[in-house]
Image: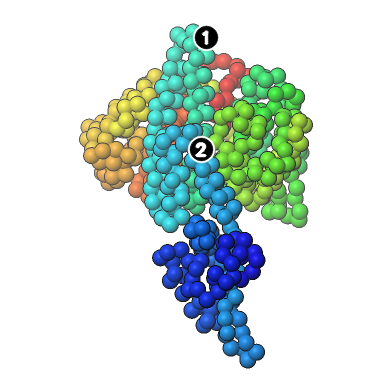
Amino acid sequence: WSPTAERMFGWKAEEVIGRPYPLAPPGREHEVEAAISQVMRGEPLRSVERIRRRKDGSTMYVNLSTAPLRGAGGEIIGVLAILEDIVDRKRAEEELHRHRDHLEELVAERTAQLAEAKEQAEAANKAKSEFLARMSHELRTPMNAILGYTQLMRRDATLSANQARQLDTINRSGEHLLALIDDVLDMAKIEAGRILLHESAVDVRQLLDALKSLFAARVRHKGLDFEASCSEMVPPWIRTDESKLRQVLMNLAGNAVKFTQEGRIALRVGYTEASSPEDGRLVVEVEDTGSGVSQTELSRLFEPFSQGEAGRRTRGGTGLGLVISRRFAELLGGTLTVRSEVGRGSTFVLDIAGPRAEGPPVDGSGPRLPVVGLAEGERPRRIIVADDEPDSRVPLAELLRSVGFEVWEAANGQEVVDLCDTLAPELIWMDIRMPVVDGREATRLVKARPWAVQPVVIALTASAFESDREKLLAVGCDDLVRKPFQEAEIFDRIAKYLGVRYKYEERAVGELSVSRL
């Protein structure tokens, strides 16, 4: 019984030696008996957490390791026990859990339930996945109504300039809230192991141009210089996951704009190639002259829910953007690192695998303007919009009617099947979660009928899981669009499957506003 043990527990040697299990809290004597029995069999116990009792009756967490004491002949004559005080570590763990609770203030009560589900999911991953799917639906469905009606109203030619600005403000706020929701859902998907990689040929220069357009207004408003350059070494196409690369770049550029009050932001894209096209690596640097981050905060920058002093002052955000960006960088076969100095700014470096790739054929159409109607000579196509939520169904139906399509609405899958018997629709926008008959079963029923021309079925879903696409295609859906939809997505899908041509708004391409990447 060492002096250190005496200080830890308050017992003197003579008060402990010879007494049966004085350190065991009431009801835990069997733990000590089991540990002694194990060691006496020659089996050491290494680094297990236990609760032990002090002389004053209080308890403490310890890290316990034991080993047999052997005599000169090798026989076991006793037990050596080493106990490490881990109270401070346990307090730190409890503090981390309190930080997680901060999520409730950002995305309200249901997101706090998500944090609780994430803890439970260590033992029940299936329960976590079901909860995540439900949260995605509950949070993204109302956002679909907000953004859908905003896009619909923005098409009104009689809007005053002030009304248009107000609608743009609503849309930007909705997009910001959607980004927060997506951050929380992405973090949960990462922890649940539900993030998948979808590689394709990616035009990095086009991605960079879109990024510049996205942040142009915010940069001008703050009076910042925004420099973006792409090395000649960068090939026309690389193979990577475009969606994840785009999200990382948006997070990094968004942080740079957010935390830079004066000066400039530089986004530089380079490329290195070791010995073959398969060894190519894309290197992106995002440099700013913002407030910078202290060395103390730098060590916590990529921890969940962690925000530096500048982040706490500006508010907004979840403290998850950089965590997600680093995880995505790792998924893309690379790293995300940072250099920073308080008062001088920060430089984030993204280095990912980017082998050369063959790009798809170029259609030469260039940037497209908003659709205002069907092209001359195009007949109106018959389309069904099926969704049990009027707030999601009506804006989509009205959007399609506004450009000249013939549209019928259905509130459940059975109504879709009944309408198909009389209308012979050419395309169906099918919500998946509906009463009576859900979207999956309705799709099976529609596809099983011997139509002269099979209607195209495109699923509308608020699901968070990328793997759901394959499941929906398996039941007969031709494609999938996630809520909240963007009108360009809707018109693109119709053109792809029905060959529809459109009439576009007449304005200069330079006036085109990019609201989302």
Quadrant assignment for the N terminus? bottom right
Image point (57%, 25%), residue name = 514
Describe the element under mark 1 as helix, strand or loop.
Answer: helix
Q: Is residue 437 visible?
A: yes
Residue placed most toward the observer, 87 or 113: 87
Q: Is residue 179 above or below residue 477?
A: above
Q: Position of residue 66 (x, y in %)?
A: 57, 73
Image point (57%, 15%), residue name = 507
For mark 1, does the 10 Å Cα neighbourhood hold few (<14), some (14 to 19), or many (20 or more) residues?
Answer: few
Horizontally, residue 11 falls left or right of residue 271, namely left
**Residue extending furthest toward the bottom:** 73
What amino acid type should be assigned to the residue bearing mark 1? Ala
Dot in front, 1 or 2 = 2
The residue labelled by disc 1 is 161
For mark 2, does the 10 Å Cα neighbourhood hold few (<14), some (14 to 19), or many (20 or more) residues?
Answer: some
Residue placed most toward the observer, 256 or 404: 256
Q: Position of residue 222 (x, y in %)?
A: 67, 20
Residue placed most toward the observer, 90 or 1: 1
Residue placed most toward the observer, 476 or 14: 14
Horizontally, residue 63 falls left or right of residue 107, namely right
The residue labelled by disc 2 is 102
**Pointers 1 and 2 in contact (CB under 8 A)?**
no
